[in-house]
Amino acid sequence: MGKVRVASFSLSLDGFGAGPRQDLQNPLGVRGLELHAWFQKTEVFKNMHDQSGGTKGIDNDFAVRSFENVGAFVLGRNMFGPVRGPWKDDSWKGWWGPNPPYHTPVFVLTHHARAPLQMEGGTTFYFVTDGIDSALKQAKEAANGKDVRIGAGVSVIRQYLSTGQVDEIHFAMSPVLMGEGEHLFSGINLHELGFAPVKTVVGESATHVLIKKR
Amino acid sequence: MGKVRVASFSLSLDGFGAGPRQDLQNPLGVRGLELHAWFQKTEVFKNMHDQSGGTKGIDNDFAVRSFENVGAFVLGRNMFGPVRGPWKDDSWKGWWGPNPPYHTPVFVLTHHARAPLQMEGGTTFYFVTDGIDSALKQAKEAANGKDVRIGAGVSVIRQYLSTGQVDEIHFAMSPVLMGEGEHLFSGINLHELGFAPVKTVVGESATHVLIKKR
């Protein structure tokens, strides 16, 4: 039986997973990109974007692990794209080009139905309109014994955390003070939900923290 | 001119500086002591309590630095002792015995006047009843060019932070999920207050983060 994981999730030192005032120009909120600077330097990220180079150290190792043994992803709609409201047409196919970096079924939470979208490389986007429980159930079935990774954003992860459906969290604490934005843990009692810290490792550009269900 | 510093301040991974439900049995709140486990293992802490031994690694180095070049301390009253309300008499002289580990003037914030209390080793406790600004002003004068360290607790530090009076913060992030309690940064915008991260170092039992005014 696979686990339900949050992995390589970027946080500021003060606990924010996204900046304030998200809009189309700032899909991660103002200064939100700074949270992900560690990831953008890695070989994993460069490969995902058909670039060569990138770092191969601790940060990259954690990024590699965040994709290992993942059989399905769940994403919030804003992580899939900038379109809001009903889909006007099927022209938006994600941020990632014809061959997205998932290579598994990906369940996108949305209020607006759309036909599944098969991409190159094994990625198929399924659009789930009946809620987080249904999305996770479908993802677990699709993962077929492998892990389900809850991708992003903050509100999706908060919903799965607060309903006790996450087994393991790896967050990457970036050397950034966000000050405002979307807080990942505020009002969520991780201790009461059964989580305990497993390890902390300082990487080249972020500090990696692993917490698991006790 | 000295700096105003918060140093060796213990935080949980989820940002709490004290546990919930503080009382005389749990002066740091339920499970609050877990936040300080890293410090209690150090040589600095052992020496403060007339014990030998203790670790001499990274955690201890940060603990040492938190006392270096400090010319005066400011403490909240609960950090000084468990007495609440008016002082019944002068019998309570702090948690630390006849020779407290400060060796400087210490300004204790309280609503209840009391004569200064001179201890061995250079520590004198002054009880300040006219607010945080007065306490800091007196501490700066007493520090005579050295740093003023804002000791604890969470509410005192939050007051000095949110009024922009702190120059530098070293917090020690313990591998603990508190879940509830007193959050150090909640509602305080450290970015807007001008702080930026300087470095992160993993110690033996805590991760040390240094942030300073830009």
Image: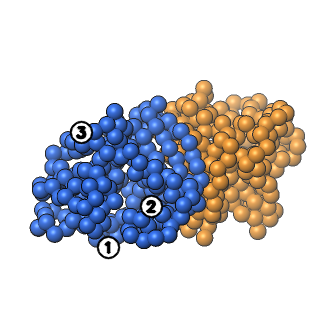
Chain colours: A orange, B blue
CA gap between label 3 and label 1 equals: 36 Å
In this rendering, which labeled residue sits more in front, label 2 or label 1? 2
| Residue under pointer 3 | B141
Q: Amino acid at mark 3?
A: Glu
Q: Amino acid at mark 1?
A: Gln
How many numbered marks are there? 3
Element type at mark 2:
helix
Q: Position of residue B200 (x, y in %)?
A: 57, 46
Disc 1: which residue: B25
Give the answer, above or below, for where B213 lies relative to B70. above
Q: Is residue B73 visible?
A: yes
Q: Residue at x 71, y 63 (%)?
A: A3
**Residue B31 rendering spot, x and y as whole percentages:** 43, 68
Q: Crowdedness of circle 2 by 10 Å Cα count: few (<14), some, many (20+)?
A: many
Check if mark 3 and mark 1 are on a common chain: yes
> Which residue does the image show at 34% across and 59% down from the upper left?
B101
The chain identifier of the residue carrying mark 3 reads B
Q: Nearer the viewer, mark 3 or mark 1?
A: 3
Q: Are marks 2 and 1 in contact (CB under 8 Å)?
A: no
How far across and down, in percent of the image, does residue B172 sit? Answer: 49, 54
Q: Dot 1: few (<14), some (14–19), or many (≥20) neighbours within 10 Å?
A: few
A120 horizontally vs A206: left or right: right
Is residue A145 shown left or right of residue A177?
right
Q: What is the quadrant of the C terminus of chain A in the image?
A: bottom right
Could you tell me which secondary element the residue under label 1 belongs to?
loop
- Disc 2 and disc 1: Cα gap in Å? 25 Å
Q: Which mark is residue B44?
A: 2
Give the image location of residue A102, x and y in percent. 79, 46
